[in-house]
């Protein structure tokens, strides 16, 4: 976007914004800030919109939210859709954005069901299905730093929209203005009945569904430390665990919603530093396990007490533990485990396939993104085979049991993990012991994620050039390991999956390396799954980036 164009856009915003505080903030922007905020537009994809909260076409604000909602309403009208569900998390302006989206959709002729207060992302998935809505909107930036917010869109099945739908919705959004159009105040639509609050009993239906999925649970001998990382799990997770008899110790002040995430500025349960307060509370209270949910309560991190210290688990490790535990649980009930299915992403540990093989169970590998796991559940449901689904998981701490929602669900996962922990404790072992038994049997495959940030207006362009170079210069070997096959996921004829900007180097014996751009951040991600040579391979890629990019 040329400089003169940016100036024209800013003039349009100055002309249309009426809020004095926003006008002052806009006038105070430096030239560099103007370029960053107005040099491009937030791109709508399968993850919806995500960006820093602030004024500008490249930021999350009421104007970008309004434009997206106008485009979504137009898409819904074009397809004869009539009803939408809306929820939001604890982030900056989340409630304002949610109410803005509700007003726009109501003005566009839609019936709107909105939550009464901030609620987890999986509840939005549940609510969309429960209320028989055509679409759902969740205002969240998941586990991103405090400065971010986002706008995620779900289809009637409660699953995040897939690529084809996202592309079509983006086309409708592109035809809309940031400022044109009129709508009433939120309260007016509520009075008219065009916006209604979700029924109070929906929450208990959701929690009852979780209890049904996980089965009989006795947590009376388990002491749990919990941190909501200042997000939406603060009320429902303790309620769920206490209903199973657990003693729950809350980590304060992280069990109070806080848009600034004061004690964990990067509220990601994948990061041990985000768990610091929770680990301290767990040690102080002598807890068996720490449960941490991210701000929108779709991801969960855990740490267990082992030999007096607290051991954290990666998303892959927790997924392996659940895979083993759930399959064994079904076998003990004399069920036919050969009919069961695990669904995981291609960057998630392949040890899950070894475990599943021992039980005769199947594994479906899908592209990165839980929407693809939800999509597979939908296909099973269409064939009347949804009972075959046992577990869906991804390396980034997302898990799903059961089919009442179609997105990762930290609440269901937390209850299942605590049930597993309690049963192992009764046998005199902990989750670390159980994981070591898995590694002893199947091999210690180590999964590591390398993430390279490319910030700035040209970040996306740099990532594109890097992926292009990797495609042209395919390595014969990496750190002494021969590359047996290079799978390019842009070649959907070979993969059988939707086209995706992903490369996988197959090194044999379940070892592989996957390279892909992040779908939500200006990062290039490299996933290593290796038995040996991890440090050398990390250095190999770091040198490539230091030298060439």
Image: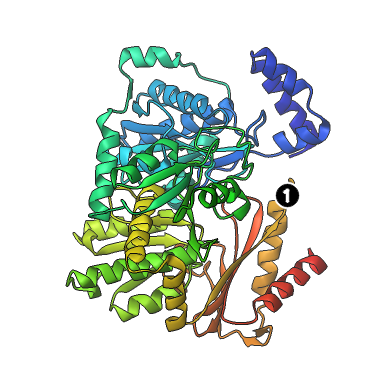
Name the residue located 56 percent from the left edge and 66 percent from the top edge.
502
Q: Quadrant of residue 393?
A: bottom left
Q: Position of residue 157 (x, y in %)?
A: 31, 46
Would residue 473 be found to the left or right of residue 182 on screen? Answer: right
Residue 322 appears in view: yes
Would you place residue 81 above or below residue 421 in this image? above
Query: Considering depth in this image, is 63 or 79 the residue closer to the camera?
Result: 63
Colouring convention used in this rendered image of the protein: rainbow
Q: Residue at x 39, y 41 (%)?
A: 238
Q: Residues within 10 Å of mark 1 (few under 14, many from 20)?
A: few
Q: Nearer the viewer, residue 450 or 317?
A: 317
As displayed, is residue 184 above or below residue 341?
above
Q: Is residue 520 visible?
A: no
Work out whether residue 245 or residue 53 is closer to the camera in this orientation and state it.
Answer: 245
Which of 289/391 is in front? 289
Q: Quadrant of the N terminus?
A: top right
The residue where tag 1 is placed is 455
* Residue at (27, 28) in percent of width and height: 199
Q: Position of residue 196 (x, y in %)?
A: 32, 22
The C terminus lies in quadrant? bottom right
Direction from residue 215 to residue 496 in the image, left or right: right
Which residue is pictured at 49% across the width and 60% down the height? 305
């Amino acid at each position: 976007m040329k400089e003169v164009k940016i100036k024209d856009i800013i003039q349009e915003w100055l002309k249309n914004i009426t809020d004095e505080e926003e006008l002052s903030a806009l006038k105070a922007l430096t030239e560099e800030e103007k370029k960053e905020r107005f040099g491009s537009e937030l791109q709508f994809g399968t993850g919806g919109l995500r960006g820093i909260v602030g004024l500008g076409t490249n930021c999350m604000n009421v104007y970008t939210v309004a434009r997206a909602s106008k485009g979504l309403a137009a898409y819904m009208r074009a397809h004869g859709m009539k009803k939408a569900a809306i929820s939001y998390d604890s982030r900056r302006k989340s409630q304002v954005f949610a109410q803005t989206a509700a007003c726009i959709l109501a003005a566009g002729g839609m019936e709107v069901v909105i939550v009464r207060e901030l609620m987890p992302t999986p509840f939005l998935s549940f609510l969309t299905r429960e209320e028989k809505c055509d679409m759902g909107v969740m205002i969240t930036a998941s586990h991103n730093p405090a400065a971010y917010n986002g706008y995620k869109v779900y289809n009637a099945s409660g699953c995040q929209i897939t690529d084809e739908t996202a592309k079509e919705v983006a086309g409708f959004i592109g035809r809309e203005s940031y400022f044109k159009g009129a709508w009433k105040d939120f309260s007016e639509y509520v009075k008219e009945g065009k916006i209604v609050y979700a029924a109070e009993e929906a929450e208990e239906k959701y929690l009852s569904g979780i209890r049904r999925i996980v089965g009989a649970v006795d947590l009376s001998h388990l002491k749990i430390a919990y941190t909501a990382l200042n997000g939406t799990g603060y009320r429902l997770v303790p309620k769920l665990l206490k209903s199973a008899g657990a003693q729950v110790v809350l980590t304060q002040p992280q069990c109070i919603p806080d848009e600034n995430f004061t004690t964990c500025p990067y509220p990601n349960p994948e990061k041990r530093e985000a768990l610091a307060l929770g680990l301290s509370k767990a040690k102080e209270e002598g807890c068996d396990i720490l449960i941490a949910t991210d701000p929108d309560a779709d991801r969960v991190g855990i740490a267990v007490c082992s030999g007096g210290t607290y051991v954290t688990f990666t998303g892959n490790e927790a997924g392996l533990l659940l895979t083993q535990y759930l399959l064994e649980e079904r076998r003990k009930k004399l069920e036919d485990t050969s009919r069961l299915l695990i669904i995981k992403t291609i960057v998630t540990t392949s040890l899950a396939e070894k475990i599943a093989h021992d039980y005769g169970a199947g594994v479906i590998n899908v592209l990165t993104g839980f929407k693809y796991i939800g999509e597979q559940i939908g296909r099973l449901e269409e064939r009347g085979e949804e009972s075959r689904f046992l577990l869906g998981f991804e390396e980034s701490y997302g898990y799903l049991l059961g089919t009442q929602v179609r997105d990762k669900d930290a609440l269901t996962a937390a209850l299942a993990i605590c049930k597993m922990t309690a049963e192992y404790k009764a046998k005199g072992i902990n989750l670390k012991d159980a994981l070591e038994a898995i590694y002893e049997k199947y091999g210690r495959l180590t999964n590591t994620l390398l993430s390279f940030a490319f910030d700035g207006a040209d970040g996306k362009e740099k990532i594109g050039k890097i992926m292009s170079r990797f495609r042209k210069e395919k390595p014969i070997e990496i750190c002494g390991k021969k590359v047996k096959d290079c799978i390019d996921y842009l070649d959907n004829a070979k993969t059988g999956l939707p086209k995706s900007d992903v490369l996988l180097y197959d090194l044999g014996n379940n070892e592989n390396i996957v390279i892909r751009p992040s779908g939500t951040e200006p990062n290039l991600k490299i996933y290593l799954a290796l038995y040996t040579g991890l440090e050398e391979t990390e250095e190999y890629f770091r040198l490539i980036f230091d030298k060439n990019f």
